Amino acid sequence: MLAEDVFVEIRVWRVPRPVPGSAHDLKDSLALVAARRCVLRYDNEAGKGDHRHSQDGAEFPYPFDDAETLIADFWREVDEWMAANRS
């Protein structure tokens, strides 16, 4: 837990074949939740491939390199969000 009403959930697991739209054998879902609302999410969905969601609901492609970079990029954005939204 990052604050009383802020937490992160990270799930990355290996799948037998790539999720349609992705070129790797990982399924991922990384979320930052604040006040019961998802404010940042990285995931790969069938047909959409690797992407991220901003707090306003916009989706952006995510250039997946490897799991370590994915997690580092996510934590960088979490830190940025925390700095901008929590004093």
Image (cartoon, grey):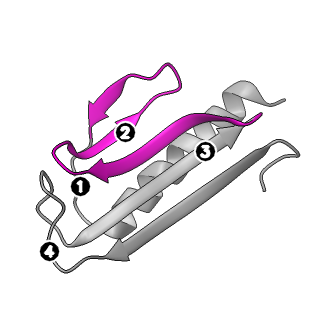
**In the image, which residues are magenta?**
35-61
Which residue in the protein does label 3 denote?
32
What amino acid is at disc 4? Answer: Arg
Q: Residues within 10 Å of mark 4 (few under 14, many from 20)?
A: few
In the picture of the structure, the residue carrying the numbered disc 4 is 17
Magenta region includes residue 7: no
Residue at horizontal 38 percent and vertical 75 percent from the top: 13
Closer to us: mark 3 or mark 1? 3
Residue 64's tag is 1
Q: In this image, 77 relative to 5: left or right?
A: left
Q: Are marks 4 and 2 in contact (CB under 8 Å)?
A: no
Q: Quadrant of the N terminus?
A: bottom right
Query: Quadrant of the rendered structure where residue 12 is?
Result: bottom left
Q: Quadrant of residue 35?
A: top right
- As drawn, the label of residue 29 is none
* Residue 66 position within the rendered picture, expressed as x and y whole percent measured from the top left: 27, 67
**24 and 45: which is toward the camera:** 45
The Cα atoms of the two marked residues, 3 and 2, are separated by 11 Å
Would residue 58 appear left or right of 78 to someone viewing this image? left
Mark toward the start of the polypeptide (2 vs 1): 2
N-term mark: 4 or 1: 4
Residue at disc 2, secondary structure:
strand
Q: Earlier in the sequence, mark 3 or mark 2?
A: 3
- Marks 3 and 1, the one that precedes in the sequence: 3
Element on which disc 4 rests:
loop
Quadrant (top left/top right/bottom left/bottom right) for the C terminus? top right
Secondary element type, mark 1? loop
Residue marked by disc 2: 52
The number of numbered badges drawn on the structure is 4
